[in-house]
Image (cartoon, helix red, strand yellow):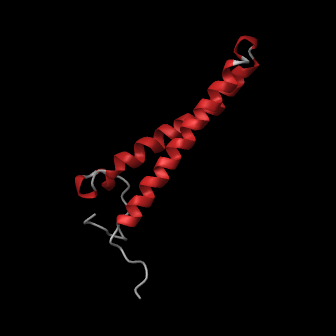
């Protein structure tokens, strides 16, 4: 990354080419993972319906797995971005 400015906090700048468009790798799994995580809670009331009692828990587990996987991807992208950064927090 060429433009590391610790005083600049625009979350949309990481979508630009000068940041290697890493924002797409960050925001897409973050938003989809959040939606999947919210979906786990959203489908739980349907577990009381007798015809859905066997379907909803399996679907909830699948959504939770998707959310967890995507959050691990977000953590990996953030970690890679930090490791690739040229910023120095403390001078030796």
Query: Residue, x 69% and y 26% (percent of image)?
Result: 57
Query: Residue, x 64% and y 29% (percent of image)?
Result: 60
Query: Residue, x 57% and y 43% (percent of image)?
Result: 68
Q: For this view, does 62 lie left or right of residue 88?
A: right
Q: Residue furthest top?
A: 51
Q: For this view, does 85 lie left or right of residue 67?
A: left
Query: Residue, x 72% and y 21% (percent of image)?
Result: 47
Q: Nearer the viewer, residue 82 or 40?
A: 82
Against 42, residue 52 (above or below) is: above
Quadrant of the snapshot with the C terminus: bottom left
- Counting from the top left corner in percent of width and height, residue 25 is at 37, 47
Q: For this view, does 49 lie left or right of residue 18?
A: right
Against 1, residue 53 (above or below) is: above
Q: Residue furthest bottom?
A: 92
- Counting from the top left corner in percent of width and height, residue 35 is at 53, 35
Against 37, residue 18 (above or below) is: below
- Counting from the top left corner in percent of width and height, residue 1 is at 28, 63
Quarter where residue 44 is shown: top right
């Amino acid at each position: 990354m060429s433009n590391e400015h610790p005083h600049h906090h625009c979350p949309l700048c990481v979508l630009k080419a000068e940041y290697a468009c890493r924002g797409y790798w960050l925001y897409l799994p973050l938003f989809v993972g959040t939606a999947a995580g919210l979906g786990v809670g959203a489908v739980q009331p349907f577990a009381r319906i007798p015809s859905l009692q066997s379907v909803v828990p399996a679907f909830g587990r699948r959504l939770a797995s998707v959310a967890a996987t995507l959050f691990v991807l977000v953590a990996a992208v953030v970690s890679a971005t930090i490791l690739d950064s040229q910023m120095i927090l403390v001078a030796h």
